[in-house]
Amino acid sequence: MMDYIPISMIKEYTYCPRQAYLKIMMMKEPPTESMKYAKQTQNTETITKTIKELGIQGEVKLEAPVKSTSLGIVGRTDAVVINGNRAVIIETKLNTGSKKKLYTKYNHILAQATAYAIAVEETMKVTVDKIIIINQEKQTTITIKPTPNLRTWIKRTIQDMKKHIQNQEPPPKTTNKAKCKACYFKDICPP
Ligand code: SF4
C-alpha cells in the first residue's frame, strides 16, 4: 500500500470512490492536460490578482508542498498566504458552480480543499481560517471555513479509502450514471 495518499485522490474518491480506487490500484491515470505549464502561469496570475483584490495580507507561497503525517496524505496546494500563525488557502478550479453547489455537485472540490487545510496546518504549524476557491470560468471566488464538520467528513473519507485499498476491496460505484458516461474506466469498471 502506498505510504501517503495524494490529496488529489481524496477529490477523486469523493467524486466516485470506485474511480479513485481503480486509479490507485492500476496506477493508471487518464491523460491529463498537456498544457500544464501554461495552466500554472495562468494560475499564478489569477491567484496574485485575487490576493490583491481581497486584500489578503501575508507571505504568499505558491505550489506549496504539504503533508499530514497523522492522516497519511500529501500534496501541493495552489497557494497559501501565511500571516503569523494564521493562514488562508487559495485553490483555483475551472468551475465550481455556486457556493451551494460546492456542498453538493462539486463537493469533491470541497473535500480536496479541506484536506489541504488539514495538511497545511500540520506542515506549517498554522491555523487555516479560510479557504478561497477561485472559479476561473466565472472569474468569481467562494470563501469557506474549514469547519469541524468538514474536517470530520474528510477524516472519515480517508479512513474509508484506506480500508478499501488495504483490503483490496473495490468501493461502491457512483450512483450518478452521468459520471460513468464520461469515465475513462467505464469499460473495465466491474459491476
Ligand atoms: S464507470 Fe462510473 S462507477 Fe465506474 S469508475 Fe467510472 S464513474 Fe465510477
Image: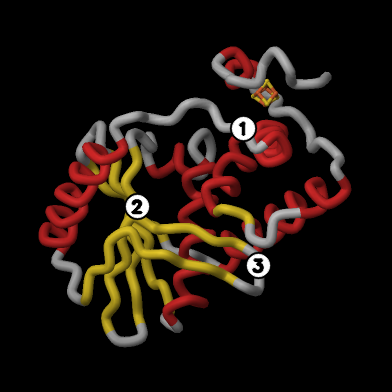
Against 51, is 23 above or below?
A: above
Which numbered tag is attached to residue 156?
none
The picture quadrant where one finds residue 180 is top right
Q: Residues within 10 Å of mark 3 (few under 14, many from 20)?
A: some
The residue located at (18%, 48%) in the rendering is: 46
Against 98, is 33 above or below?
A: above
Cβ–Cβ under 8 Å for marks 1 and 3: no
The response on whether ligand 1 sits within 8 Å of label 3 is no
The residue located at (70%, 55%) in the rendering is: 2
The residue located at (35%, 34%) in the rendering is: 95
Q: Residues within 10 Å of mark 1 (few under 14, many from 20)?
A: few
Q: Position of residue 183 (x, y in %)?
A: 59, 20
The residue located at (59%, 20%) in the rendering is: 184
Label 1 vs label 3: CA separation?
A: 23 Å
Label 2 vs label 1: CA separation?
A: 25 Å
Q: Residue furthest bottom?
A: 84
The residue type indicated by label 3 comes to: Leu
Task: Find disc 3 in the rendering and name its residue.
Answer: 71
